[in-house]
Image: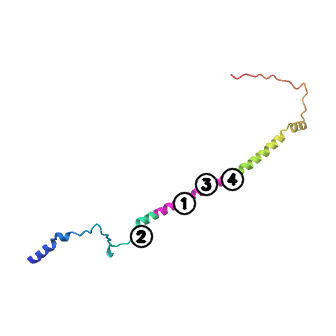
Amino acid sequence: MALARRVEEELLILQPEQLTIPLPKTKENIIILPRKHEIAVPLFNMSLLRYVCTLAAILMISGFVISARASYLYSVSQGIETFQKEMTVLRNQNDILKIHIAEASSLEKIENRATTLGFAKPSQTQIYEMPVIRQGLN
């Protein structure tokens, strides 16, 4: 028993020379290669995968939003074009109505229409002048 205890004590006590690791000289080139069992090469990087997936999702969402806005703007521009076409048609009709009103309200046509309805030209005794009183604005 005493012998086993002594062997354990000798194994537990390390000599100072065994604790120090020899350091290389500063002028030497050292290449430290890892051992084969320490090399763990991942097939893919999870943080990179998350970054790429997030970036792809953001691009897809922004593409969807942009295409939706473009579609909305296209429909609005089509509506504006139809309103402009309707306005040009209405302006043309308005011009035609102005021409008909001008032709219908010409003095010659009104005079002819009045004579057919039985109106006669007034005589000098039927025409009299009325004085117009003009008041100044204060």
Classed neighbour count for the residue bearing mark 4: other residues with Cα under 10 Å, few (<14), some (14–19), many (≥20): few
Classed neighbour count for the residue bearing mark 1: other residues with Cα under 10 Å, few (<14), some (14–19), many (≥20): few
Q: Is residue 123 above or below residue 87?
A: above
Gap in angstroms between the C-alphas marked 1 and 2: 29 Å
Residue 129: where, in percent of width, then height? Answer: 84, 24
Q: Can you name the residue that lies furthest to the left here? A: 2
Q: Along the line of sight, which residue is nearer the eye, 104 or 64?
A: 64
Task: Give the labeled residue for mark 1.
Answer: 64
Task: Give the labeled residue for mark 2.
Answer: 44
Magenta residue span: 53-80
Query: Which residue is pictured at 56% across the width and 57% down the height?
Result: 66
Would residue 50 appear left or right of 73 to someone viewing this image? Answer: left
Gap in angstroms between the C-alphas marked 3 and 4: 14 Å
Quarter of the image with the C terminus is top right
Question: Please, what is the three-letter code of the amino acid marked with disc 4?
Answer: Thr
Q: Is residue 82 above or below residue 30?
A: above
Q: Secondary structure at mark 4?
A: helix
Gap in angstroms between the C-alphas marked 4 and 2: 56 Å
Task: Give the labeled residue for mark 3.
Answer: 73
Asked if the residue at tag 2 contacts the one at tag 1, i.e. Cβ–Cβ closer than 8 Å, the answer is: no
Which tag, 1 or 4, sits closer to the chain's start? 1
Task: Give the labeled residue for mark 4.
Answer: 82
Question: Please, what is the three-letter code of the amino acid marked with disc 2?
Answer: Phe
Gap in angstroms between the C-alphas marked 3 and 1: 14 Å
Report if residue 1 is visible in the image. no
Residue 75: where, in percent of width, then height? Answer: 63, 56
